[in-house]
Amino acid sequence: MEHRFLVVTTTCIKRRRNIPYIVSVMSCPYCNNQETKVTDKRDSDGITRRRRECLKCGKRFTTYERVEWDLNVIKKDGGRQKFNRDKLKDGVEKAFEKRPITTEKLDAAIVDIEARIFRSSKDKEIKSEKIGQIIMDKIKKMDKVAYIRFASVYKDFQDVSDFKKEIKEVN
Ligand SMILES: [Zn+2]
């Protein structure tokens, strides 16, 4: 049985309590058919996970539907920037480059990190340091090499001793 995660990023159409909700037109990632049957549904952390079966080719896949918050990131210099999901995804994927991890697990980790970011935000804002910490906490539990890679970029290690200290902490 085929299994694949698909992160839904379809544009929001509907509004509820001033929060834009994602309303997705779901098409099968294998044959592009738009008629799918939901076989299982689970909600957690503002993310709805649905197991779907394509009514045309019969293949199964999972979709994640998430609330698209209007989130601002407060940078170190105090400036503000819109939260960028792609940037988060790029950073995490880069850390796991050539590491033994499936796309499914990596996608699920990114969804989880994102949920934590939204949960930790206040008044639609979050500090960039907090985001970095959330990502590092998650990666640390998954893969030490990926963690060191991410931390070295994120923490911008000044010299070799910083790096050694971090490696010592992980082991
Ligand atoms: Zn299909």
Image (spheres, rainbow, N blue to C red):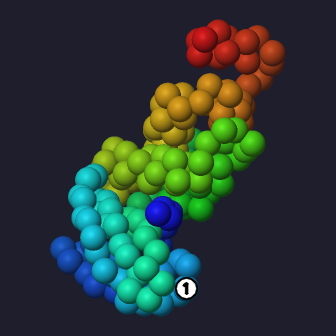
Seen in the picture, residue 68 relative to 111 is either above or below; the reply is below
**Where is residue 98 drawn, in percent x and y?**
75, 42
Residue drawn at x 67%, y 15% is 167
Q: Could you tell me if residue 127 is visible in this image? A: yes
Q: Is residue 109 left or right of residue 49?
A: right
Q: Could you tell me if residue 10 is visible in this image? A: no
Alpha-carbon neighbours of circle 1 within 10 Å: few (<14), some, or many (≥20)? Answer: few
**Where is residue 138 drawn, in percent x and y?**
48, 35
- Count of numbered circles on the image: 1
Q: Quadrant of the C terminus?
A: top right
The outermost residue toward the front is: 1
Q: Is mark 1 within 8 Å of ligand 1?
A: yes
Q: Amino acid at mark 1?
A: Cys
Q: Is residue 96 left or right of residue 64?
A: right
Location of mark 1 (residue) = 31
Seen in the picture, residue 55 relative to 165 is either above or below; the reply is below
Q: Is residue 149 left or right of residue 119?
A: right
Q: Element type at marker 1?
A: loop
Quadrant in the picture for residue 36: bottom left
* Closer to the camera in the image, 151 or 93: 93
